[in-house]
Each structure stands twice: as C-alpha cells, then as structure tokens.
Image (tube, helix red, strand yellow):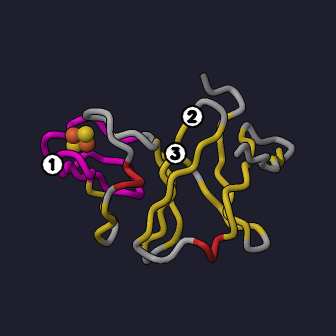
Amino acid sequence: MNQINKISVEPDSSLEWVEVCPASEINVEDVRRFDYGSSTFAIYRTEDGYHASDGWCTHENAHLADGLVLDDVIECPLHNGRFHIPTGKALNPPVCINLKTYPVRVDNGILKLGLSQHRS
Ligand code: FES
C-alpha cells in the first residue's frame, strides 16, 4: 500500500519535514522502518528521545529496523554489529563505517523526519 506523507518546508531551511507517524506509536527502546521515495530509514526512540538513521546497515544487506535497541545502541540483526544511535558511530566489528543520521522532531504529536531538499 502506498502511503502519502505530508511535507512541510520552513522558510530559510534546507530541510523538508516528512511525517513519519504519531510519536506515541514508537515506544522507548523501539525501532521501526520508514520508507520514503527510494530511501529507507530506521526511526528510533531511546530514553533521551527520537532519532533517525539510514535504514540499511553499512556492513551488508540488513535492515536495522529488524535489529535490537539496547539503550542508545542499535545492534544489527545479521552479524551483531553495533552503532551509537544518536551519532551513527560504528562501535564494533564487523561494522566500521558510520551510519548517516537525520534530524527528527515532534510537531503536535506527529514525528517528523528532516531531509535535505538537495539530497541525492
Ligand atoms: Fe550488519 Fe553485518 S549486516 S553487521
């Protein structure tokens, strides 16, 4: 099923804010997949709030939304590589390439993902 997401663009901002879901749908220490256009993301909620990163592990072909959130760390489901969720930093082998992270915010209870309007 195709889903249409509302987008808002603020003046003087290079970001478009894409609606992901009601913020309350993601529990603490949860991760979910979010597909938008040809891109896929992993959206997290940790004790300190919401975060977003690229969805695919930088090691091989595994989606991090199938992984396990442990405090502020995501563990990949395929080879147990770990990344620091807020920064995307690769923490242990076999992952050695950091994840790209993205800004998120909550507007009126809706979780939004900030994407560059000029991304490739
Ligand atoms: Fe993620 Fe190998 S695919 S650690």
x, y percentage for residue 21?
Answer: 68, 63
Disc 1 and disc 3: Cα gap in Å?
21 Å
Q: Residues within 10 Å of mark 1 (few under 14, many from 20)?
A: few
x, y percentage for residue 39?
Answer: 57, 34
Q: Quadrant of residue 24?
A: bottom right
At a point 61% along the width and 57% down the height, the residue shown is: 104
Q: Indicate which disc residue 41 carries.
A: 3
At a point 83% along the width and 48% down the height, the residue shown is: 8
Q: Which residues are magenta?
A: 76-99
Query: Looking at the image, do the residues carrying marks 2 and 3 touch, with CB atoms under 8 Å apart?
Result: yes
Magenta portion: prevailing SS class: loop
Disc 1 secondary structure class: strand
How many circles with numbers are drawn on the protein? 3
Q: Indicate which disc residue 105 carries.
A: none
Does any atom of ligand 1 lie closer than 8 Å to the CB of label 3? no
x, y percentage for residue 72?
Answer: 34, 66
Asked if 18 appears above or below 118 in the picture, the reply is below
Q: Quadrant of ligand 1?
A: top left
Q: Residues within 10 Å of mark 3 (few under 14, many from 20)?
A: many
Tell me, yes or no, whether the highlighted magenta stretch contains residue 29: no
Q: Which residue is label 2 attached to?
A: 39
Q: Earlier in the sequence, mark 1 or mark 3?
A: 3
From the viewer's perspective, tell me whether residue 90 is left or right of residue 24.
left
Q: Amino acid at mark 3?
A: Phe
x, y percentage for residue 35?
Answer: 59, 43
Q: Amino acid at mark 2?
A: Ser
Q: Quadrant of residue 120?
A: top right
Q: Residues within 10 Å of mark 2 (few under 14, many from 20)?
A: few
Task: Tell which tag, 1 or 3, sits nearer the viewer.
Answer: 3
Q: Indicate which disc residue 92 carries.
A: 1
Residue at the farthest top position: 120
